[in-house]
Amino acid sequence: MTAALALLAPHLMTTPPLLTLQGVSRRYGDVVALEDVSAAVYPGEVLGIVGESGSGKSTLLRMMNLEDTPDAGDYRLALPDLPGNLFVLDRFARRMLCATRIGIVYQNPHLGLLMKHTSSGNVAERLLIAGERSFAALRGRARDALEASEFPLNRMDARPFELSGGMQQRVQLAKAIALEPALLLLDEPTTGLDVSVQALVLDTLKRLQRDRAITMVIVSHDLGVIRTMADRVIVMRRGRVVEQGLADQIFQDPQHDYTQQLVHAKL
Amino acid sequence: MTLATLTKPWAAFSYGFLDASAKREMRRKMLKAIAVPGCQMPYASREVPMARGWGTGGLQVTLTLLKPSSSVKVIDQGADDSVNAASIRSFLSKVSGAAETWDTQAATLIQSRHRIPEERLRADQVLVLQVPNPEPLRPVEPNMSVARQMHADADYGRLWLILYEQMVRSGRIMEGAAYPALVNRRHVMTPSPIPRWDVPKLHMAEHLTFLSAGREKRLYAVPPFTQVEPLVFSDVPYQVEDHGALRCHRSGVTGYYMNEIPQDNGGSVFELSDSNLGIKAIRRAEGAQVEIGPTWYENGKMPQ
Ligand SMILES: Nc1ncnc2c1ncn2[C@@H]1O[C@H](COP(=O)(O)OP(=O)(O)O)[C@@H](O)[C@H]1O
Ligand SMILES: [Mg+2]
């Protein structure tokens, strides 16, 4: 195996990681969802996580969003006023941290949105949790976030269940970026969308990434998506990281058998 | 020697209808409720000779606080003489020997549905509000155990969201009675179905307020000098009902919460909702020596 530093893009080697996960393991009964997973995400980069269904990708993302606590492991974000291992935080502190510093988009919009409330309201709720109490500011900031997600503003007070899948993902995205989070987590954000819609949503994500230099972690079982988005890639199988490296490296010269199968199946 | 000479003469073991253990349960929960202002405490709701939904929650708190030296006032929508209020009041007096009164000033214990009297309550008075639905989160979260978790997390984003959407839809906040309020900067409560007019009276009040729901078996409290802040946006002021300029057609008094009384000609007249205040004002105008205490609102405005 190559030394860890050699796996980084040159401009990343100089900055310490924003996110560090170390030795994270999680079992659900007999199922090993994660086994000794370590990962780092550097400021401004997009980390892709690939792997077949059931390989633990969503579980890993849920850990990063502090929705679950592992059996073992350490999780740090290089942000001010945080303790060392974030898994020691109580519910209350987790909720505040997630609401204010981390944004997440789920594959299933029902997980991320209140379907019967307005789209702008879904975004405003995020701001309300963070303590915004001015109605004008709520309205304005919700509009800005929806606009940045390229959501059609004439529908901003429509309820998500009246919207198409692509629109719903844009509302989730607006909600996720409304507070300008340090970290944006995307769990299969385009899976299940029409190919053309999928391309448009990916375009939006790429543009956001370029304009705001948001640090992103994107999970997908679709190598095409990962290839479009990611700077660096982690390949997971049965809860373990089997290979990681620069995206180009992984796609052109996969080392692990499993990665080779994945890449060749795709190509 | 007979058995009778060895025993004490018969005397009531307890008063106030509830037995000692029921009262102890209530007292414990009432003390807890005072300790965590605005937080709903579940309690073992007893049977009282009244149907659930008619103020049994308030009644149990009142019965627990009641003693023979109490003076008890009961109002329903501000009126002492409604059938409900009158029968609860006479029941309370019958089971405890407490005096009945209509006068807010003279009462030590006031049980109420829908209103807080206009005269300021004092530190030596206790207000008991009957609450039909104690859960402010019910409109946003039908599952009560999830709602309880949300209270524990102070997770009130969705409650605010409802207000946001009312503003978006109609440009103003539509909550009428039972306007949600943040107590002691921690728990959101439903201040019973009192009008918006009455909510500011609870803020930093001198008196103790209990709110109790018999059917839902939960009570909560606003201790004296506790902050009670209606949920409002910083740029959309809290508005009470527009009653400040209305005049009571019977007493001529202005500046208080009024009931609207429709007339045959299609118009309407207004009447003081706090009926005892109206009676006192009329008697005073007729020359009687009547003491009207200081009121929360002055000239139709709540001084800050
Ligand atoms: N809350 C849970 N309870 C039980 N098993 C779970 C739970 N979450 C995930 N798993 C199991 O952990 C494994 C990994 O799941 P997941 O992270 O969702 O995989 P992926 O997102 O890669 O498809 C699966 O076998 C799944 O069934
Ligand atoms: Mg998944």
Image (cartoon, coloured by chain):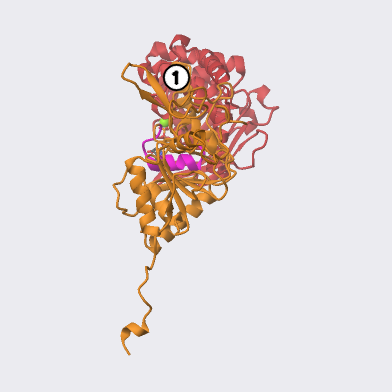
For label 1, the SS is helix
Q: Is mark 1 within 8 Å of ligand 2?
A: no
Three-letter amino acid code at disc 1? Ser
In front: B64, or A51? B64
Q: Is residue B89 left or right of residue B167?
A: left
Q: Position of residue B169 (x, y in %)?
A: 43, 17
Name the outermost residue toward the right.
A14
In front: A74, or B268? B268
Residue matched to label 1? A119
Q: Position of residue A110 (x, y in %)?
A: 39, 27
Quadrant the C terminus of chain B occupies? top right
Binning the other alpha carbons within 10 Å of mark 1 as few (below 14), some (14 to 19) or many (20 upward) gives many
Q: How many marks?
A: 1
What are the residue bounds of the magenta stretch? Answer: B140-155
Residue A10 occupies quadrant: top right
Q: Chain of mark 1?
A: A
Q: Position of residue A149 (x, y in %)?
A: 51, 15
In front: B132, or B277? B277
Q: Chain B rendered in what hue? A: orange
Q: Chain A rendered in what hue? A: red
Q: Position of residue B135 (x, y in %)?
A: 41, 39
Is residue B204 within the magenta segment? no
Q: Quadrant of ligand 2?
A: top left
For residue B235, say whether it is visible: yes
Is A248 situated above or below B286?
above
